[in-house]
Image: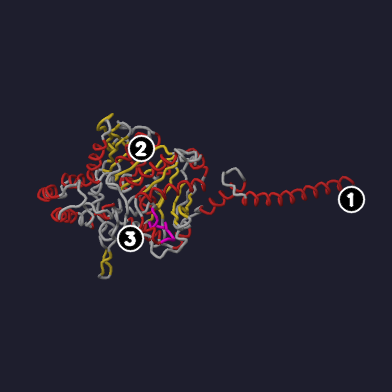
Amino acid sequence: MNKNMRTSHHVAFSVLVLFLVSSLLGTSSAKKLCSDGDKDGDGGCFRSRVLAAQRADRVTELPGQPPVKFRQYAGYVTVNETHGRALFYWFFEATHNPSKKPLLLWLNGGPGCSSVGFGASEELGPFFPQNSTQPNLKLNPYSWNKAANLLFLESPVGVGFSYSNTSRDISQLGDTIAAKDSYTFLVNWFKRFPQYKSHDFYIAGESYAGHYVPQLSEVIYNQNKIASKKDFINLKGLMIGNALMDDETDQKGMIDYAYDHAVISDGLYKRVNENCDFKLEHVSKECNNALDEYFDVYKILDMYSLYSPRCVPTTTNNSSISHSVAGNRRLPAVRGVFRPRLFSNNEGWRRMGAGYDPCASDYTEKYLNRRDVQEALHANVTKISYPWTHCSDRISFWGDAPASVLPTLRTLVSAGLRIWVFSGDTDGRIPVTATRYTLKKLGLKTVQDWTPWYTKQQVGGWTVEYEGLMFVTVRGAGHQVPTFKPREALQLVHHFLADKKLPTSPF
C-alpha cells in the first residue's frame, strides 16, 4: 500500500471516529435538553417532540378515502391532566399554500353535538361518508379547506370521541366550562402545531355555537391581554350561522316564521301569542299545550329545512327500519332541553336535521363507529363504553347558559373583531326571522340596508351591513347552510376571511 493510500485511510478513519463521537454527544445533549424541560421552542428537543407529536397524529389514509394532496391530522389534546380530560380534533391543511392561509376552527352546537359528525362529515369538510356496504368517502368539491386550514373540535367532553376519566365532569358541564376547555385546547394545540401560531385565526359555527363561538372569542380576547407571547392567539374574527343568540327573540321568531310560512294555523298562532310570554322562564300549562301542538306539525316536516324531504323508513321482511335523523333519535339540538325555559318539555326541541340526503347522518354514524376508521383517526383510544353518536345522550345536564349572548357580542364588536352572522332562510329552528329580531335588539347602527348578493347570475341572498357586524342571508338554505348551499357557503367564507363584501351584481 503506497503512502497516499495510507493517508487516505487514516483520514477516513478519523472522520468516522469524529462522526461517532459527535453523534454520542448529540444524543447526550438532546437528553439534557429534554431533562432540562425545554418548553420555549428554542431547543432541538422541543422541535423533535413537536415533529414526533405531529407524526403521531398524522392521518395517512382513511378507509374508503379518495386520494388527496393535502395533509390531515387527528387525535387528542389534554385539557385537564388531573381529571384526565381530553378533547378530540380533526385537522385538514388547506388544499393550496397552507403556510399562507388562515386557520379556521369550526364548532357545531347542541349543546352536545359533534363538529366531526356534522361539520366535518356532512357540511364543510373534505370527505363525506356514503351509503355503501364498504367504507366509501366522497370528496366534497366545496370543502372549506379550499379557503383555510380547517380545524374541527368535539367539545365539550362527552361529545363524540372526547372523554374524561373523571365521571363527575359530565354532570358539571355548561357554557363556562365549554369555553374554558376549548381555550385550553387551543393553547395546547398550538404547542403541537406551532407553525400555525402566526396565522390569522378565526372561529365559526352554527346553532348553539351562537353561544360557543362568541364565548370562546371573548375568553381569547380577555386572555390575550395577560397571556405570554407563547400563549397569545392571533384571533381576527368570528362567524356564526342560524345561531342561537337570544331566548326571547329566537323563540318569538320561531313561531312567527312558522305562521308566515304556512306551517301553523291562525288559531294555533293566536293561542301561542295569547298564552306564551317569551320573556318568562316558566310558562303556563296553556302555553305548553299550545307548544305541544306546534311541535306536532314538525313530526311530519323537517323543522331544520322546511322544504326538504324527510328520511323515510325502509321496510325489509315486514319490519320497518327507520333511518330518520329528524324524527326518531333523541338529539339535544338546542339548550332549551337543559334549562327550564319555554320549550324544555317539548321533544321537538331536540331534533336535528340532516341535509340534502336526509339519511346522511346514518352513513356518518356507521362510518365513524368502524374500528378501522377509529384506528386511522387515532380515536377512541380509551375504548369508551358507548358508541359514537352525532349528539351525546350522556349529556343530560347543562349547568349555565345565559338567556342572551348579546352582551358578549357587544364586547366583541367594541374590540374591533370581524363579525359575520349568516342565516339559511328555510330553517324553522333558528329561522332568519329570529335572527333579524335578535340583530335589531342588538341595536347597532345600519350602514347599508337590505342588499342582494350574487353567486354568478343568481341571487345568493341578502346582506345588511351594521357598524361592526355583517348579516348575510342564504337563499334556499336550511339550518346547516354548507350542506344545503355548498357553493354559496364556500363563497361566503372566502369573502369573510378576505374581509370583502359579497358581490352585489351578477358576474
Query: Which stretch did the figure color magenta?
Result: 156-166
Query: Which callout, 2 or 3, points to the residue nearer the camera?
Result: 2
Q: Which residue is mark 3?
A: 393
Decide: few, some or many residues near mark 1? Use Cα within 10 Å; few <14, some 14-19, many ≥20.
few
CA neighbours of label 3 inside 10 A, class few (<14), some (14 to 19), many (20+):
some
Specify whether 14 is left or right of 295.
right
Q: N-terminal of the two: label 2 or label 3?
A: 3
Q: Secondary structure at mark 3?
A: loop
In the image, residue 367 sits, relative to residue 423, either above or below, namely below
Residue 326: which disc?
none
Residue at image position (49%, 45%) is 190
The percent coordinates of residue 423 (x first, y second) are 28, 42
In primary-sequence order, the first of circles 3 and 1 is 1
Label 2 belongs to which residue? 412
Residue 389 position within the rendered picture, expressed as x and y whole percent measured from the top left = 36, 59
Residue at 80 percent across and 48 percent down: it is 14
User: Could you tell me the amino acid type at mark 1?
Assistant: Met
Helix or strand or loop: what does disc 1 sit on?
loop
Mark 1 or 2: the one toward you: 2
